[in-house]
Amino acid sequence: MKKTLIPLVVSLIMVVFVSSSFAQAGHLWKNKQLVKELGLSEKQVDKLKSVSLDTDRKMIKLRADTEMKELDLRELLDSDSPNEAKAVGLIKEIMRIKTDQKIMKVKQMILVKKTLTKEQMEKLEQKKRENRMKRKQKNPGKMGPNGDFKAGKGQRPNQPMKP
């Protein structure tokens, strides 16, 4: 049983810590200065806002579903004689939900790219690079390879480390 569960649990943990560097782009409509710098039209802002809120609503449900399945898995594994088939089934279900989350993030990214012009996307990418460099300079040693904060114990990637 352990031989089967260990690779699946490791895969699950890896998926949890994978983050999209594009995650905040869907929320750029909230940053009025960035909207101005990119030269976004009101129609573009409305589209980005709609896509962002729709994605957020779906992601909230998927995260809740994931947490419930993870709780079920912990409960099963804490029992005196866990059922391997049920554990594997729960892990597969968790992975399916996480795959749905990744697909949703990619779809959001594609919609953002379709909404912005090529020039706006280039400006946005430049802004993201500049922000990563500022964070890296401000917090040396706490940054991951993508310029994101490294996750500390009990934290998700892209969250500031606890002091």
Image (spheres, rainbow, N blue to C red):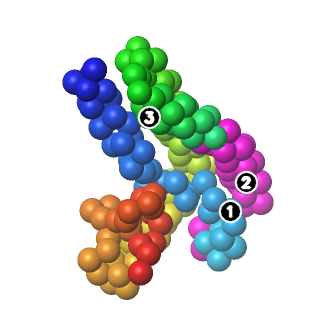
- Label 2, label 3: how far apart the Cα atoms are: 43 Å
Give the residues in magenta: 36-63
**Residue 80 as seen in the image, left or right of residue 144:** right
SS for tag 1?
helix
Q: Inspect the image, locate mark 3, and give the three-letter code of the amino acid beneath it.
A: Asp
Q: Residue at x 68, y 62 (%)?
A: 29
Counting residues from the start of the chain, the first of labels 2 and 3 encountered is 2
Residue 92 x/y as whole percent: 44, 23
The answer to the question of whether label 1 and label 2 lie on touching residues, with beta carbons closer than 8 A, is: yes
Does the rendering let one see residue 125? no
Q: Inspect the image, locate mark 2, and give the three-letter code of the amino acid beneath it.
A: Lys
Counting residues from the start of the chain, the first of labels 3 and 1 encountered is 1
Q: Which residue is mark 3?
A: 78
Q: Inspect the image, locate mark 1, and give the three-letter code of the amino acid beneath it.
A: Trp
Number of dots carrying numbers:
3
Q: Tell me the mark number nearer the camera, choosing from 3 and 1.
A: 3
What secondary structure prevails in the magenta region? helix
Q: Which residue is mark 1?
A: 29
Q: Residues within 10 Å of mark 2 (few under 14, many from 20)?
A: some
Residue 49, numbered label: 2
